[in-house]
Image (cartoon, rainbow, N blue to C red):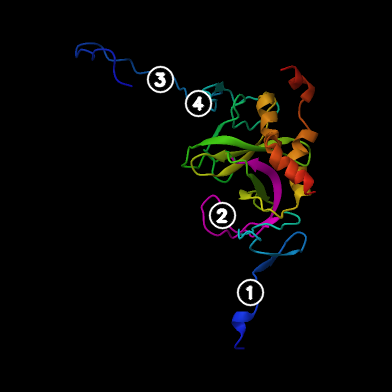
């Protein structure tokens, strides 16, 4: 953003050095959603591995192969692509990176937006032509 | 020996899960990468780094994804290394398994769906 104020005069005091560490401690892993700019805390009900925004379900491509390794160079935005159920009945979200098409899956959290989840689950049935053709071919 | 050009050359593969022998190309010319009967696949391409994969594990179908064009994609997960891939659905794929996967989340909702009726 361009500077809107006049540049500081030479004799003015410089800003004091701050020694508060913002990138350590309990709130270190909190993140802001790339989709809706919601501030998200990683403490979530029902899951210890929150990686997506509870409001718009968007995520960020930071992990490579192992969840939590933070080894990916991509940093692309990951959109929720599909929902599936694990054999124990838990819903999982499949995310797809918009910049490199990589896929990843994560369990839903207790405070995820129920409407967004159901809309995602209903997406295969949304196109009635495709769904009815599949039913006819059964 | 001289009429080798007349012999039928069809590339086939055997499904690692149900043992069905399937052709590698479908009737509409697209390349097939999963069994049309049980929809299982094999982990041969590395999605993270690209190129061929050393894993060769069996990949089971887990989800249906929908493109913006409305086409269905099949999401597979490798049972050995848990990598995910997505492939387009072929015309002769088993529709029962496809439909079952599409409605499976709705059969086990994590919250009561009645609450959404009041929105």
Mark closest to the chain's N terminus, 2 or 1: 1
Q: Pointer 4: what residue? A: A24
Instruction: Find disc 1 in the rendering and name its residue.
Output: B9
> Whole-Å distance between the Cαs marked 4 and 1?
63 Å
Q: Which residues are magenta?
A: B40-67
Mark drawn on residue B30: none
Residue visible at 61% across and 83% down in the picture = B4
The answer to whether one can see residue A47 in this image is: no
Tell me residue B64's x, y (percent): 68, 43
Tell me the element at label 2.
loop
| CA distance for labels 2 and 4 | 35 Å
Residue A129: horizontal and vertical position, in percent? 70, 40
Q: Secondary structure at mark 1?
A: loop
Label 3: chain? Answer: A
Q: Nearer the viewer, mark 2 or mark 1?
A: 1
Location of the N terminus of chain A (image quadrant):
top left
**Chain of the residue on which disc 1 is drawn:** B
Main SS type for the magenta part? loop
Q: CA distance from mark 2 to mark 1?
A: 28 Å
**Mark 4 and mark 3 in contact (Cβ < 8 Å)?**
no
Mark in the foreground, 2 or 3:
2
The answer to which of A71 and A114 lies nearer the viewer is: A114
């Amino acid at each position: 953003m361009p500077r809107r104020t006049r540049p500081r005069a030479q004799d003015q005091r410089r800003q004091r050095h701050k020694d508060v560490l913002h990138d350590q401690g309990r709130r270190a892993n909190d993140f802001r959603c790339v989709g809706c700019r919601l501030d998200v805390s990683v403490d979530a009900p029902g899951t210890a591995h929150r990686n997506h925004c509870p409001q718009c379900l968007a995520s960020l491509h930071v992990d490579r192969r192992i969840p939590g390794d933070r080894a990916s160079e991509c940093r692309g935005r990951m959109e929720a692509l599909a929902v599936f159920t694990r054999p124990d009945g838990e819903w999982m979200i499949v995310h797809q990176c918009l910049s490199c098409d990589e896929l990843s899956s994560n369990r839903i959290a207790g405070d995820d937006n129920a409407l967004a989840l159901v809309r995602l689950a209903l997406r295969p049935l949304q196109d009635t032509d495709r769904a009815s053709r599949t039913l006819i071919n059964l | 020996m001289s009429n080798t050009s007349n012999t039928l050359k069809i590339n086939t593969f055997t499904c690692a899960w149900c043992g069905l022998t399937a052709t590698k190309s479908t009737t509409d010319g697209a390349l097939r990468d999963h069994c049309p009967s049980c929809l299982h696949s094999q982990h041969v391409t590395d999605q993270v780094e690209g190129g061929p994969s050393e894993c060769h594990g069996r990949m089971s179908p887990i989800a249906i994804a929908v493109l913006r064009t409305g086409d269905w994609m099949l999401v597979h997960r490798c049972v050995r290394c848990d990598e995910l891939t997505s492939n387009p659905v072929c015309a002769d794929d088993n529709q029962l398994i496809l439909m079952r996967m599409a409605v499976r989340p709705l059969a086990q909702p994590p919250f009561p769906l009645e609450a959404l009726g009041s929105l």
